[in-house]
Image (spheres, rainbow, N blue to C red):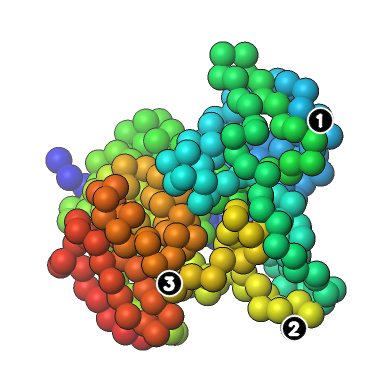
Amino acid sequence: MTRTTTAATEGRALGTGVRLVVTDPALLDSCDLLLARHLAEVDAACSRFRTDSELAALDGTAGRPVRVSPVLAEALAVALRAAETTDGAVDPTVGSAMDAIGYDRDFTLVREDDRPVRLAVRRAPGWRRVRLDPATGTVAVPEGIRLDLGATAKAWAADRAARTLAAAAGCGVLVSLGGDTSVAGEPPAGGWQIRVQDVTGPVDETPARGPYATVGLRGGGLATSGTTARRWRRGGHDLHHIVDPRTGLPVRSPWRTVSVAAATCADANAASTAALVKGAAAERWLTRRGLPSRLVAHDGTVVTTPGWPSTALEAAA
């Protein structure tokens, strides 16, 4: 039987907003505790901003194989798979480039920092230089390479949490981390209703600007990547957090946001980020991969690929 009632709670973790929705209100508190534990594990393993994280510890290993936890090994496997499936448009070796443009701490602190930055074109070292051995649980990161899992870790964490919570609670679960959304278990009647927009905001408020659409999701994940939300200004430069691995600089794309639905939130987020990097070629690339997508140009024009629900309620803010 499809459940019709839901309960939700919101908070913060991994430097972003967290939203949890369950189809059994009696299980919300226990699911919330389990989610908090799960996200704390991910943060301890994958954070680029914590000096005590497992990821930070790889900075000084100079290419030596190092045993890592199953959590970090899985996160790295997802990142490397994303790099392969996007032809390198999403590359976890952009850590040094992110530091160079000033994104070297939690975003709330980045916006308050007024130190100038010196922008220089420098190609990312390349994901193929990172060696992950699943059999031994070891990873080798060559000297001079700093990893950044920002393009994949939150979406993967949402997938992992939604699956874990749904299995433990036996009900439908939605986990959204900064707008990257994964669902598992039996959905509510009519599916999970999710609003797609330029900037993540309260679910009960109409977006202040930009077009938005509401879609129904019954499984898998939905992610939006964009250049409009995480922006800051340094030394006369307008910067954002989507870096082109070919240049090491914030990407210049004809799209301000791209939303993608896929079998997992991790796949959706890798594709939406890659689409920004691929620019004018993104629509064809997404269509060829069979990924339902919604692309918003800087002037507000909306383009969709086959499979994006034609019944989606589209509106302009």
Q: Which mark is residue 236?
A: 2
**Distance CA(mark 1)–CA(mark 2):** 36 Å
**Distance CA(mark 2)–CA(mark 3):** 22 Å
Q: Which mark is residue 62?
A: 1
18 over 312 or under it: above or below: above
Closest to the observer: 98 or 162? 98
N-terminal-most mark, 2 or 3: 2
Tag 3 residue: 255
Q: Is residue 298 left or right of residue 123?
A: left
110 over 9 or under it: above or below: below
Residue 101, percent across and down?
Answer: 73, 65
Callout 1–callout 3 Cβ contact below 8 Å: no
User: In which quarter of the view is residue 317 placed?
Assistant: bottom left
**Distance CA(mark 1)–CA(mark 3):** 38 Å
Residue 182, percent across and down?
Answer: 39, 47
Residue at x 24%, y 61% (from the top left corner): 305
Q: Is residue 157 left or right of residue 214?
A: right
Residue 288, percent across and down?
Answer: 27, 50
N-terminal-most mark, 1 or 2: 1
The amino acid type, in three-letter code, at marker 1 is Ala
Residue at x 19%, y 58% (from the top left corner): 306
Residue at x 44%, y 46% (from the top left corner): 86
**Which quarter shows the N terminus?**
top left
